Image: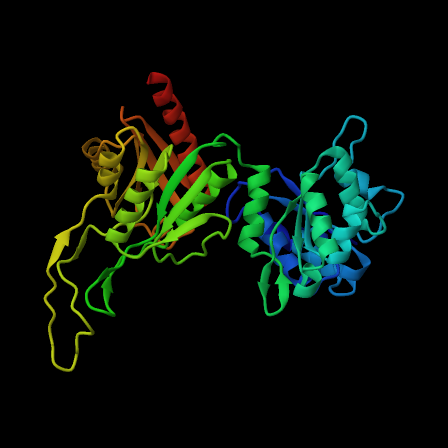
């Protein structure tokens, strides 16, 4: 006898990484590519952000992995054939008094066969029928191709992809490697889902310059002084700004996180590199916002020794350091009207002291907003996927964003920045 009090084990992971997709239902469609082995991982990453996932599998997909695996991964029964229950209408169709249950159709992986069938309106699998149904109900569709490279280059397939894009379908570019068009990185797939389902388009037409990651200041030709910044906070802000429609340029140091391939990026190393890149960009382009999230070194060695210092002959190194320019000060001098968001990191200070130090920096550097956080805490420090911040404006109004994922924090930073930016525009 079935115990109704038992909870499916997959439910334990829901919202374990945040709530940004809470209340959303993703219809995850699987087709006959060997990349289908990644589908359970995609499903569970969506669930960790709060989404409910319902799987639909073509017959070819079921020959590669057992539907029981997707039921285990999602906690929901898997649709492998359409019955009198009209599952495609339940998921993706309009019906009297109700919309389809799914908020988004994610076809991952998608074979050349399935892509071309959808483009030609052929419905002979549960996946293609769900896709066709969603066209009629305007549910967004994201297709993630996976196949051999030679198949992906087929001119008819390329025509069919173009046709689908013109119909408003998102197609993620595959990674071409080892003679194969492999599915996009899982992080990029999740980001695209978030972009469509969550992000507002309130930065459409805005140009946003963002810095991220640490600097490296050379001691000799092989050694350097750096910090523990991973770059994740700045990268998440760049992703969120791009999702909201902004034209984003990311200036990134040696980050420990993967940089999104769809965002234009300038790669730099030292403080001087960051400053030059920022000055050049502000000089030649009219940016609306500059968000300085990089962890720029406060000090750097006065001189860099040529070659490698030999440990055979030298027992002690006395390193003379000098103060580096504040990148936000440089940006302000370059453009007095530029809207600047600065960051202030402190360690193990009280809330009051953290806010006061950040506000003093805001006033001194004449920036519009400053984001303060305590990097001394293990649960929100540099290496953490989470953060907790205080966003402070010129009037010392404080927005406290409690501990959450850095993507969520990024969305709140941009919310406040845009509100203050618009008020500043009206004033001028």
Which quadrant: the C terminus? top left
**x, y percent for residue 171:** 64, 48
**Image: 370 above or below 9:** above
Spot occupied by residue 176 in the image (x, y as percentages of width and height): 59, 62
Using residue 64 as the reference point, say whether residue 292 is left or right of it: left
Residue 18 location (% of width, % of height): 51, 44
The picture quadrant where one finds residue 217 is: bottom left
Is the residue 33 above or below the residue 408 in the image?
A: below
Find residue 192 and report its horizontal and vertical position in percent: 57, 45
Q: Describe residue 47's horizontal placement relative to residue 235 as left or right.
A: right
Assign the N terminus to one quadrant of the image: bottom right
- Compare residues 323 and 348 and report the one nearer the observer: 323
Looking at this view, is 103 or 398 the one in front?
Answer: 103
Residue 414's quadrant in the figure?
top left
Nearer to me, 33 or 155 = 155
Image point (59%, 49%), residue name: 46
Find the residue positioned furthest to the bottom.
312
Residue 323 sits above or below residue 240 on the image: below
The image shows a total of numbered marks equal to 0
* Camera sees residue 355: no
Q: Residue at x 68, y 65 (%)?
A: 150
Q: Residue at x 57, y 55 (%)?
A: 186
16 sits to left or right of 312? right
Q: Residue at x 81, y 43 (%)?
A: 87
Is any atom of residue 161 visible in this view? yes
Q: Residue furthest right?
A: 84
């Amino acid at each position: 006898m079935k115990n109704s009090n038992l909870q499916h084990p997959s439910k334990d992971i829901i919202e374990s990484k945040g709530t940004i997709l809470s209340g959303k239902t993703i219809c995850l469609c699987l087709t006959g590519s060997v990349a289908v082995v990644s589908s359970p991982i995609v499903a569970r990453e969506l669930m960790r952000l709060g989404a409910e996932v319902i799987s639909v599998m073509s017959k070819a997909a079921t020959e590669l992995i057992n539907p029981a695996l997707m039921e285990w991964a999602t906690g929901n029964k898997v649709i492998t054939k359409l019955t009198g229950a009209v599952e495609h209408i339940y998921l993706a169709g309009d019906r009297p008094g109700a919309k389809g249950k799914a908020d988004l159709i994610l076809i991952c992986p998608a074979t050349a066969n399935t892509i071309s069938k959808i483009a030609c309106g052929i419905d002979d699998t549960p996946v293609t029928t769900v896709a066709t149904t969603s066209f009629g109900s305007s549910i967004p569709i994201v297709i993630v191709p996976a196949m051999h490279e030679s198949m992906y280059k087929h001119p008819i397939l390329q025509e069919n992809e173009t046709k689908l894009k013109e119909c408003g379908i998102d197609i993620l570019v595959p990674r071409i490697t080892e003679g194969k068009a492999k599915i996009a990185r899982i992080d990029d797939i999740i980001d695209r889902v978030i972009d469509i389902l969550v992000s507002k388009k309130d930065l459409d037409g805005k140009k946003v310059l963002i810095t991220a990651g640490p600097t490296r200041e050379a001691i000799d030709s092989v050694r350097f002084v750096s910090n523990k910044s991973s770059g994740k906070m700045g990268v998440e802000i760049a992703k969120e700004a791009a999702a909201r429609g902004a034209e984003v340029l990311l200036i990134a140091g040696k980050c420990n996180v993967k940089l999104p391939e769809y965002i234009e990026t300038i790669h730099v190393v030292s403080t001087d590199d960051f400053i030059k890149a920022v000055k050049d960009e502000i000089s030649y382009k009219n940016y609306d916002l500059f968000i300085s999230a990089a962890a720029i070194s406060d000090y750097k060695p006065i001189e860099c020794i040529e070659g490698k210092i030999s440990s055979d002959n030298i027992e002690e190194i006395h390193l003379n350091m000098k103060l580096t320019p504040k990148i936000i000060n440089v940006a302000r001098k370059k453009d007095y009207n530029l809207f600047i968001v600065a960051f202030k990191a402190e360690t193990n200070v009280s809330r009051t002291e953290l806010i006061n130090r950040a506000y003093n920096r805001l006033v001194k550097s004449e920036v519009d907003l400053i984001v303060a956080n305590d990097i001394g805490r293990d649960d929100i420090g540099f290496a953490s996927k989470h953060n907790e911040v205080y966003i402070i404006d010129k009037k010392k109004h404080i927005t406290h964003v409690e501990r959450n994922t850095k993507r969520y924090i990024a969305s709140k930073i941009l919310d406040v920045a845009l509100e203050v930016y618009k008020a500043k525009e009206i004033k001028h």
